[in-house]
Amino acid sequence: ATASALARSHAHGGAVAAVARARRAITTRNQVENEIYDRSRQEIPLGNRVPSTAVDAWIAPNATIAGDVDVGNSSTVWHGAVLKGDLGAVRVAGWTNIMEKVVIDAAGAAARIGQHVTIGACTSISAATVENNVLVGARSVLSPGSHVESNAVLEAGSVVEENQLIPSGQRWGGNPARFIADVDGNEAKEIVTIGDDIRGAAEDHADQTLPWGNAYWQTEKLRASLLKE
């Protein structure tokens, strides 16, 4: 009985030690992977397709612009957004806001976003055109060939079908998107005001963001050395 108890005690002690080792390993890995730095890169050249951003544009640290992408003066690209110019050109004009987790690609044709535009969070835009002074609500979908004219508003969750035209000065919404009402002068001005407020908030974020550069080369070396320990 005594030997059996000792065996159980030894097995229990071994299990406790194994759990402790696993916890230490997880903690070390979390420190390396999560706490020291973010391995994502903001700007990624793809062959001869090279991203370009205006000096006063703000790109969030974990946003990605890859390939043939231009981001204009005073525009913002927020956290988790992806602008892919691998198959065509993506053009974002000045004073425009691309919000969190927006995905814009140019599969088959260019994607063009005008000035004073706000694209709401989690929106997907593929090879579509958005003219100046437009508000696109969150979680919307702009299908290839679709076109949103100036001073228009898309309600949250709108789905604009392939080659569909949203006329200037109108509010649309739904799936598929349908006409709701005309946009009056005050609403059109509000589109610009909303955009200005968002860019003001981006300045606060930019103050807390390290400048873009090639420092990730050194951090990759640091990570490799830590993982060897």
Image (spheres, rainbow, N blue to C red):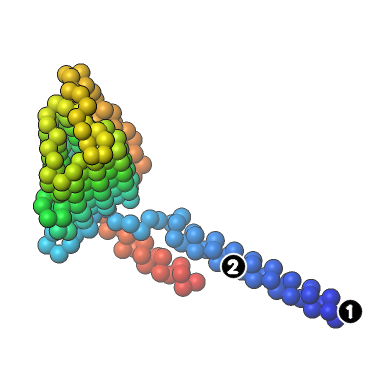
The residue where tag 2 is placed is: 22
- Residue 182 picture location, percent across and down: 17, 23
Question: Which of the image's four quarters has the N terminus?
Answer: bottom right
| Residue drawn at (73%, 71%) of the image | 13
For the residue marked with disc 1, what is the amino acid? Answer: Ala
Q: Nearer the viewer, mark 1 or mark 2?
A: 1
Which residue is located at x 15 percent, y 46 percent? Answer: 162
Q: Residue at x 27, y 43 (%)?
A: 123
Image-quadrant location for residue 97: top left
92 or 161, nearer to the observer: 161
- Camera-nearest residue between 93 and 74: 93
Task: Name the residue at 21% across, 54% down.
Answer: 84
The number of numbered discs placed on residues in the rendered structure image is 2
Image position, residue 31 (x, y; %):
49, 59
Decide: is 24 above or below 71.
below
Q: Work out which residue is located at the far right of the displayed protein and give it.
A: 1
Seen from the viewer's position, the closer of residues 111 and 206 is: 111
- Mark carried by residue 1: 1
Please tell me which residue lies in front, 14 or 163: 163
x and y, in percent, of residue 32 in the image: 46, 62
Give the secondary structure at mark 2: helix
Judge whether 215 appears above or below 128 on screen. Answer: below
Query: Which of the numbered marks, if any, corresponds to residue 138?
Result: none
First in residue order: circle 1 vs circle 2 = 1
